[in-house]
Image (cartoon, rainbow, N blue to C red):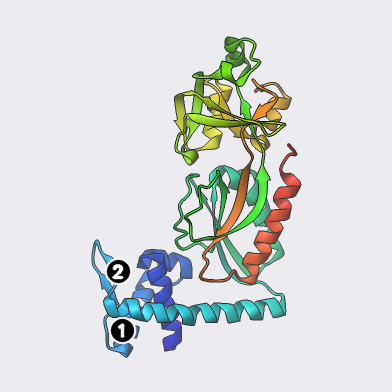
Amino acid sequence: MGIVDDLTLFVETVRAGSLSAASRKTGIPKSSLSRRIGDLESQLGVHLLYRGPRTFSATEIGLSIYERSERIKDELDAIKALAETFSNHPSGKLRISCPAVLAESLVSEFAIGFSIAHPDVRITLDSSVGAFDPAIGDYDLMIHPAHGDMMVDSELVRQKLSAASYRLVVSPGFMKSLGTINDPSELQDRNGIGWAADGHLAGWTLVDKNANTTELNVNLKFSASNLNVIRQATLSGAGLARLPLAMCNADLMEGRLVLPLPDWAPPSVTMYALYPSRRSLTLAGRLFVAGLTRHLQDNLPAA
């Protein structure tokens, strides 16, 4: 292996934050990765990394070399992406992070089909708990719903995939305890089910068909990070909940859930593909994002 290859591995290691994370990203065993960086240090005659049981960081000279090596790696990535585009043959690894419920309900089907259609692309689809983390780590892509300006401070590039409609729902039993509801004000301080992805907010925004908005304050009696758990709590009568229409549509059609305010709903949530701004997506990544956009638009229920 040449010094350029070892420099790119050094960049991957610093970006990943540890040898273990870099090993997962590159597919190179941790011991081999450590040896390669050791060989690079010997060739350059300097120490590049502080490596201890609890510490991992670039040395002062290592950071300077990393900053210059980033440009080398980015140019190599751009060259590879250009060659892939010219040959129109996607290949390589594509690591994707996606909230568990979204992965299970919509993304996994497309990802599996994409993998079969492009045999030289190796896909890893990992599920996240749902809370947004601006550190993309060793992933090439992050699929995530955005709530308002949640990602405004993120340095990641955002590409819109689709918008998902949400509904305010309750179980028939809970609806019976509410009585007749004609206005959002009549739901103030009722029991609600919180969601970790929005910080367990007790103040919910509702929008009507004329784009009028109102704030609904609920009494959070139960909270969860997983929308499947929230759906189960709603079906059990724990309180009001906000669920994606794609998740609760069948429950509404079959009467397991009802709309306490049919003319009001939570705002739609936009789903994005996110990736680091410092490097371009490979052809495989670009094709995946384009195809997933069409897949979501075709499969999300209309508002």
Q: Is residue 294 above or below residue 236?
A: below
Q: Earlier in the sequence, mark 2 or mark 1?
A: 1
Q: Give residue 117's position: percent from left, percent from top.
A: 71, 63
Q: How many marks?
A: 2
Q: Is residue 35 visible?
A: no
| Image quarter (top left, top right, bottom left or bottom right) of the C terminus | top right
The answer to which of 181 and 240 lies nearer the viewer is 181
Q: Amino acid at mark 1?
A: Glu
Q: Give residue 213's position: percent from left, percent from top.
A: 62, 31
Residue at figure coordinates x 72%, y 32% from the top left? 210
Residue 57's disc is: 2
Q: Amino acid at mark 2?
A: Ser
The answer to which of 201 and 126 lies nearer the viewer is 201
Q: Give residue 203's position: percent from left, percent from top.
A: 49, 30
| Image quarter (top left, top right, bottom left or bottom right) of the N terminus | bottom left
Q: Which residue is mark 1?
A: 41
Left or right position of 60 against 102: left
Q: Residues within 10 Å of mark 1 (few under 14, many from 20)?
A: some
Residue at figure coordinates x 34%, y 79% from the top left? 64
Callout 2 secondary element: strand
Residue at figure coordinates x 45%, y 25% from the top left? 220
* Front disc: 2 or 1: 2
In which quadrant of the rendered view does residue 115 lie?
Answer: bottom right
Left or right position of 31 against 4: left
